[in-house]
Image (cartoon, rainbow, N blue to C red):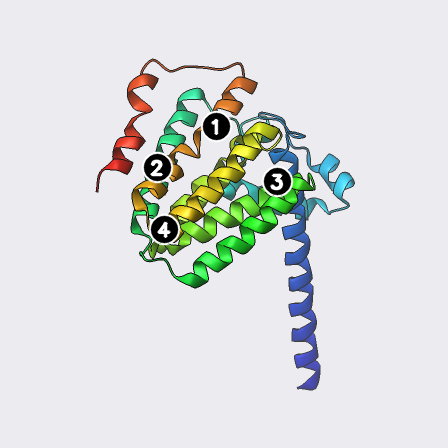
Amino acid sequence: MRGRQDERLEIELENRDGDSQLNALVDSIKQEIIFGRLRPRERLIEDELSQRFGASRHLVRSAFTELQQMGLVTRRPNKGVIVRDFAPEEVDEIYEMRAMLQSEAARRIPFPVDPDLIERLEEIHADYEAAIEAHKLKRVCELNNTFHHTMFSACNNNYLSGLIQRVWTETLGIRCYAIGDPLLLARARDEHRKMLDALIAGDREQLIQLCVDHIWPALEAYKSAHGGWRTSDERERRPFPLKVAASG
């Protein structure tokens, strides 16, 4: 009996270690994508990544599956796994959806806001400012994600906050284009502060507007880096999320 318990414990520990290795590998490849070291449409080769990160090919394949579920890579016939690229129309539609989802989440956050939520967001924002000052861009990206996830999770609708997180992860490679630009990074920091102030003041209209306006600078930076594009109906479509934000 004792031997079986020891065997089960050993298997459980091996599984935990495997999960830890997989999570670390997924995070490493994700960071390569976020900061442009792995470019859109670039093929991910198992052997190269296995040698680079000291991981087994089986672990690399498992990481590909995780990254595909996140929407960061895709499998193409005869090309294997490649870093996901977005068609211009797809990017515009995704960002329309982000604006709609985030404005709805901001509308559903109960006012007056729970002081514990304010305290948590203040802590995250302070760490975010410190990371910007120290030029720790990976940490900046992590804290940016944490700030928004914490705020939108307060909408009291797990499915809505889950959808936001899904789209948020899929657009990591787009959103983080603004991180390398000091002016855009300073703007994001200031807008986070304004969101906090709106939550504290109970100004829902201001909060909703900020949650919508906040998403566009990174998109414009991404467009600029890819030669820019302008869809035929962009003028009509861009104000649409703002109209959604103003309704209710």
Q: Is residue 174 above or below residue 121?
A: above
Residue 242 horizontal side relative to residue 227, left or right: left
What is the three-letter code of the residue carrying label 3? Lys
Residue drawn at the location 39% of the way across and 38% of the way down? 210
Work out whether mark 1 precedes mark 3 in sequence or the reverse, and give the earlier one.
3
What is the three-letter code of the residue carrying label 4? Ala
**Dot 2 alpha-carbon crowd within 10 angstroms: few under 14, some 14 to 19, many 20 or more:** many
Q: In which quadrant of the rendered view does residue 229 lie?
A: top left
x, y (%) of residue 112? 32, 58
Work out whether mark 4 precedes mark 1 in sequence or the reverse, and give the earlier one.
4
Task: Measure how far apart labels 3 and 4 are at the Cα level.
Answer: 37 Å
Residue drawn at the location 62% of the way across and 34% of the way down? 33
Q: Nearer the viewer, residue 55 or 220?
A: 220
Work out whether mark 1 precedes mark 2 in sequence or the reverse, and give the earlier one.
2
Which mark lies nearer to you, 3 or 4? 4
Mark linked to residue 131 = none
Which mark lies nearer to you, 3 or 2? 2
Q: Secondary structure at mark 2?
A: helix
Task: Measure how far apart labels 1 and 2 are at the Cα level.
Answer: 14 Å
Work out whether mark 3 precedes mark 4 in sequence or the reverse, and give the earlier one.
3
Task: Measure how far apart labels 4 and 2 are at the Cα level.
Answer: 15 Å
Mark 2 highlights which residue?
Answer: 209
Residue 128 horizontal side relative to residue 149, left or right: right
**Dot 4 alpha-carbon crowd within 10 angstroms: few under 14, some 14 to 19, many 20 or more:** some
Instruction: Report the quarter where the N terminus lies.
Output: bottom right
What is the three-letter code of the residue carrying label 2? Gln
Which mark lies nearer to you, 1 or 2? 2
Mark 1 highlights which residue?
Answer: 217
Mark linked to residue 201 = 4
Mark 3 highlights which residue?
Answer: 30
